[in-house]
Amino acid sequence: MVYIAVLGHGVVGSGVLEVFYKNNKSILSKAGIDMDIKYILDLRDFPELPYAEKFVKSFDPIINDPEVKIVVEVMGGLDPSYDYVKRCLLSGKSVVTSNKALVAAYGAELLEIAKNNNANFLFEASVGGGIPILRPISQCLAANEIREISGILNGTTNFILTKMISEGMAFDEALALAQKLGYAERNPAADVEGMDACRKICILASLAFGRHVYPEDVHTEGITSLTLQDVKYASAWGGVIKLIGRVRKLDDGHIAAIVCPAFIEKSSQLAGIDDVFNGIMVRGDAIGDVVFYGRGAGKLPTASAVVADIIDEAKHLGARKYVYWLPAEDGYVCDYLKASSVFFVRVGTQDKAAALKSADSLFGKVTEVVCPDMPKNEAAFITPELPEGELERALASLSSLDFSIISKIRVLSDL
Ligand code: HSE
């Protein structure tokens, strides 16, 4: 008998219990081994639940019980998750987690500890919720050199942007609706400011390219400053605005990574991914582009991935799994100001022709974007591709000529 402990009985934890017992017969048959959940760690009491007797309020019985071979961490955050997970791995217990903050911050260290203690550290649910993405990258696509991964990695912001695009809802109104429907937290900062997507692109980048990419090294912009006018310009240009997490391998071995709102063309495979859905495009040298689509969050979709990891681990107890990456050296992720992109720019001006002429001389030939009800005193244009540092210098020159910069949004036409 393999015993499991679940740390945390919140949304994901209760989903894990629900899926594990609802589909218990087929789960055990797929695992090919008898297993059960022995402990659930939570400070609250749940006397109404059929498995109420499994609850404990201390981590001690779990870490001290040699029968517990698999620990499922679904508490979220870093404290005490990091300490608990590390102690489990050090004592040879394998860990399954959905905790993206933990994996993005400490993945390399925890994978190394797992390796040294003949245990596994599995986290399929940490990116894309229920969408299979980490296993496909490390197993099914293993023959490829991965060139790039780009995706819509956050359901909350995708819901807000969808409402702005399809229903002309302002950002604040769409956020309030997302909160009302339970998609956005009362404090939505991690989602709307891009941190959640940043952690996920870090995990994808680390797995795909073999070195740890830390969130603090990834330039991250959220969607809080986007307006309905920006959305209209994107439509006039022939696309939509999406919050994109992107990582690319450069020819010199370094990594370019960013999270930002971007114009993408309507024909892009990511453009039609709406509402709370996530979509992740992996670009490999043999496969070309492959897109993974589905529910990136929520109780049962996330539990689906967690329980699959439990089954996988139960089948491979004592055997090392495929997931591994190394720490990275300083400078592994290149400075975003050195990366090149095409940009959409809006400037405030009384003299549109003069603004476009100055833009032409500062950026190289720009392409004007017009939309039916655009504000009178502004010009909008698309730049040629140029390094972001050069763009910033040109924008500063434009400002010094008395043209105010209203917004700057990256244009990712190759997605
Ligand atoms: N808040 C996240 C989202 C949940 O909206 O995608 C899953 O990480």
Image (cartoon, rainbow, N blue to C red):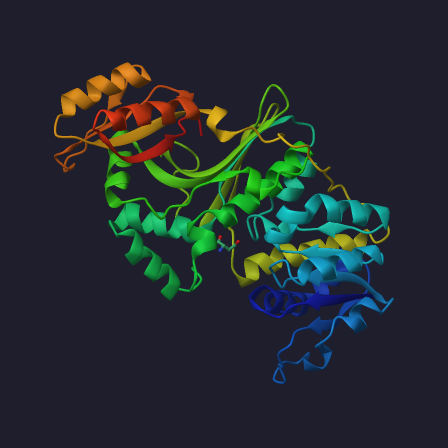
Q: Is residue 5 above or below residue 166?
A: below
- At horizontal 60% and vertical 23% (from top left) the residue drawn is 285
In this view, the residue in front, 146 or 86, is 86
Q: Is residue 275 in view from this perspective?
A: no
Q: Quadrant of residue 255?
A: top right
In this view, the residue in front, 176 or 222, is 222
In this view, the residue in front, 388 or 276, is 388
Q: Is residue 215 above or below residue 388?
A: below
- At horizontal 61% and vertical 43% (from top left) the residue drawn is 203
Question: Going by the picture, which residue comes out furthest to the bottom?
Answer: 47
Residue 260 point in image, percent of width and height: 43, 39
Q: Quadrant of residue 265?
A: top left
Residue 145 point in image, percent of width and height: 65, 25
- At horizontal 24% and vertical 49% (from top left) the residue drawn is 168
- At horizontal 72% and vertical 60% (from top left) the residue drawn is 83
In this picture, residue 368 sits left or right of residue 201: left
In this picture, residue 186 sits left or right of residue 31: left
